[in-house]
Amino acid sequence: MSLRIVTTTLVIGIGTVMLLGAYATTQIRDGLVEDRVDRVLAESARDAATAQDLASSTTAANAADMQQFVLDLLIELRSVGGSQRGIVVLRSPDNTSQLPLLVGALPTGIGPAVSTDMRAAVADGQSLSWQFVALPESEVPGVVVGTPLDLGVAGPYELYFVYSLSDEQDTLALIQQVLAIGAVVLVGLVVVMTWYVTNQAVRPVRQAARVASRLAEGRLSERMKVRGHDEMATLAQTFNDMAESLQRQITRMEHLSRLQRRFVSDVSHELRTPLTTIRMASDVLHDAREDFDPAAARSAELLSTQLDRFEALLADLLEISRIDAGAAQLEFEAMDVGDLVRDEVEAMIPVAGGLGITLTMRMGPGPHTASIDRPRVGRIVRNLLSNAVEHASQAGVEVAVASNRRGVAVLVRDYGVGLTTQQVDRVFDRFWRADAARARTLGGTGLGLSIAREDALLHDGALEVWGAPGQGASFRLLLPRTSEGLGKNPPLPLVLRQGGFANVGELVEFSAAVTAAGAAHDQAQESPASPLEEETP
């Protein structure tokens, strides 16, 4: 910022000084020239009158005497005007005298300074005409003043006074030099002052930026130094007050977060003991339910089912507590992610068949080896499959696996009710449900997708979602294969339209036992046939 301000000030300063210098130079030049012209005209008028008086009183009657008179007149006028003035005498164009041509110039060689336009103005009868010219040879600016001169028997002539403006030119050059030196000194002084003032103003801002950066790194005890009682001191004090307030709030929130995690962990652990006792009693009742009346038998079944969900909820709460506390432990091993996904799809086929949901899987060219924690990645895929089956609405679920040099992608796509934009933003929130009135077909605790995303992040991967109302939803799991990370070109797009899975790879065939299990589960649900028979031979 200091450099930007100094540069801006320098540009503006140079521009202003140049404009002022040009204006001052123009005014001084015009003043010098105007004053010089006034003096030249007054002097020329006086000497022209003197010359005319001498010409009128001369007794010269022949050419020789008249030529001598002209030479004497030139010498006299030259001595009166000094070295800065030249004299030129020229015969008028309308002179009809029979005397030989009388011309003269002092100093010699100055005659070309008289232009044709100047002679025309004098010939028109103007008593005193003048013009700016460039003097011959030296190209020094000058002024030519012309007037008619009657030489009696020699007829009409023209008298010209040629003045040099070299003194004025030298004066103007000196003034310009002084102005240039003054401008350089002034601009330098402005730059130095601007740099100093800017540093005075920017220094506290830089200090605040350094302190803010350290606060962002977690060093909450950092503070700015307060000096004096000016505006900068007020800024530093206000910044310190803000940092103090932030430290108190962050500390309080960290304390509350620790208490919350400890509470969830403690409750989960403490509930395990009574839950174990309740589980034992529930198992006894469940095993003996055939001896009960129908209402009591149904109650025993419901008790066992809800205890299963309760145990799953406690396990998820403990897992999320460990993740929040940073205590999650991973055991990495190199394995083919495609085989893991295949196993999870095989396990889900009977459940999907019972709901009339078709499960298909396609595998891109492999292998799809990556270093992963198998239980956690398996849990991610299992959560995605169960979520897709639950929301597929008889429309089927498609699974795809593909990889490139840097990553492996697992895509789970359903064509059910879909998700709105607001639901997509909240789908990974804990205990959030897109439709609170919708019953859970496959159970679930409300933490599955939250834990799945945390598991993906623990692998330095990503779990992404897309959805549209009436078009279904798509979840994509990305896992890195190298230390370089995922890269910018994932192996699979997040959204594959219906029919697009055929381009991923070959259709995965499952064993006859799995197909038979799906068919049996389907028949138990009073379905006419297994939905997997056509897709999974």
Image (cartoon, rainbow, N blue to C red):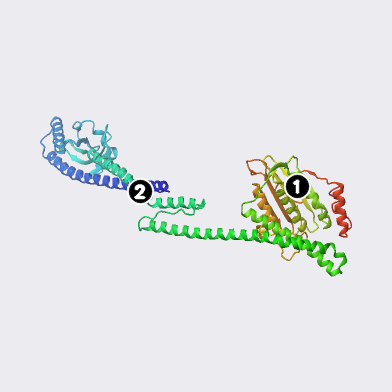
Q: Residues within 10 Å of mark 2 (few under 14, many from 20)?
A: some
The amino acid pointed to by label 1 is Ala
| For residue 100, side relative to residue 212 (left or right) | left
Asked whether disc 2 touches disc 1, contact meaning CB atoms under 8 Å apart, the reply is no
| For residue 337, side relative to residue 208 (left or right) | right
Q: How many marks?
A: 2
| For residue 273, side relative to residue 114 (left or right) | right
**Residue 100 on image: x %, y %:** 19, 31
Say which residue label 1 marks: 400
Residue 139 falls in which quadrant of the image? top left
Q: Earlier in the sequence, mark 2 or mark 1?
A: 2
Disc number for residue 196: 2
Q: Residues within 10 Å of mark 1 (few under 14, many from 20)?
A: many
- Marks 2 and 1 sit apart, C-alpha to C-alpha, by 65 Å
Local secondary structure at mark 2: helix
**Residue occupying the point 41% across, 58% down:** 237
Residue at the outermost top position? 64
**Residue 272 on image: x %, y %:** 71, 60
| For residue 96, side relative to residue 526 (left or right) | left
**Residue occupying the point 67% across, 61% down:** 270
The amino acid pointed to by label 2 is Tyr
**Residue 254 on image: x %, y %:** 56, 58
**Residue 31 on image: x %, y %:** 25, 47
Please indicate, yes or no, whether residue 440 appears anywhere in the rendered image: no
Check the image and report above or below for 277 versus 130. below
**Residue occupying the point 72% across, 53% down:** 474
Question: In the image, which is nearer the foreground, mark 2 or mark 1?
Answer: 1
Please indicate, yes or no, whether residue 218 appears anywhere in the rendered image: yes
Local secondary structure at mark 1: strand
Which of these two is toward me, 71 or 494?
494
